[in-house]
Amino acid sequence: LMHGARAIHPPAVLRAWLETAKVLPARVGRLQRVEEAWRVFGADGRVLAEAEIVVIAAAMHASPLIPTLPLSPVAGQAE
């Protein structure tokens, strides 16, 4: 075990989040910070949405959306 590690049950968390979330089935091309919100652009360049909070659940595939995010692959997982 990893000291201080935490684990969640993803399906339960996702169900709770999705109860109030607006889900857009689209491929996101980029994000842009606009004052106090985020503007979400589709792969085709059109604006899909604006929101105060954006959740990116894409693991290593998040890098193209936020290149400054310090991500690096890690083998294994905490249990």
Image: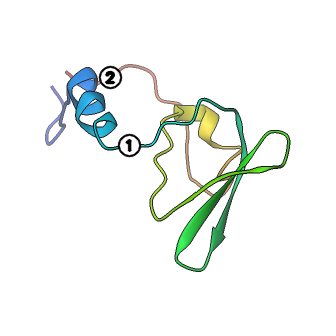
Q: Say if mark 1 contacts mark 2, CB within 8 Å.
A: no
Real-space Cα separation, disc 1 to disc 2, in angstroms: 28 Å
- Closer to the camera in the image, 74 or 35: 35
**Label 2 SS:** loop
Under mark 2, the amino acid is Gln
**Label 1 SS:** loop
The residue shown at (14%, 42%) is 4
Relative to 56, residue 35 above or below: below
- Count all numbered tags in the image, as a single digit: 2
The residue shown at (17%, 36%) is 6
- Closer to the camera in the image, 25 or 55: 25
Kindly report which numbered mark, 1 or 2, lies closer to the viewer in this rendering: 1
Q: Residues within 10 Å of mark 1 (few under 14, many from 20)?
A: few
| Residue ID for mark 2 | 77
Horizontal and vertical percent for residue 38?
58, 63
Is residue 78 visible in this depiction of the protein? no
| Residue ID for mark 1 | 21
Q: As drawn, is 69 to the left or to the right of 44?
A: left
Relative to 38, residue 63 above or below: above
Question: On the rendered image, what quadrant is the C terminus found in?
Answer: top left
- Closer to the camera in the image, 31 or 62: 31
Horizontal and vertical percent for residue 69?
58, 54
Q: As drawn, is 24 to the left or to the right of 40?
A: left
Taking the view exactly as shown, the residue that stands out farthest to the bottom is 35
Is residue 32 visible in this depiction of the protein? yes
The residue shown at (63%, 33%) is 61
Question: On the rendered image, what quadrant is the N terminus found in?
Answer: top left
- Closer to the camera in the image, 59 or 27: 27
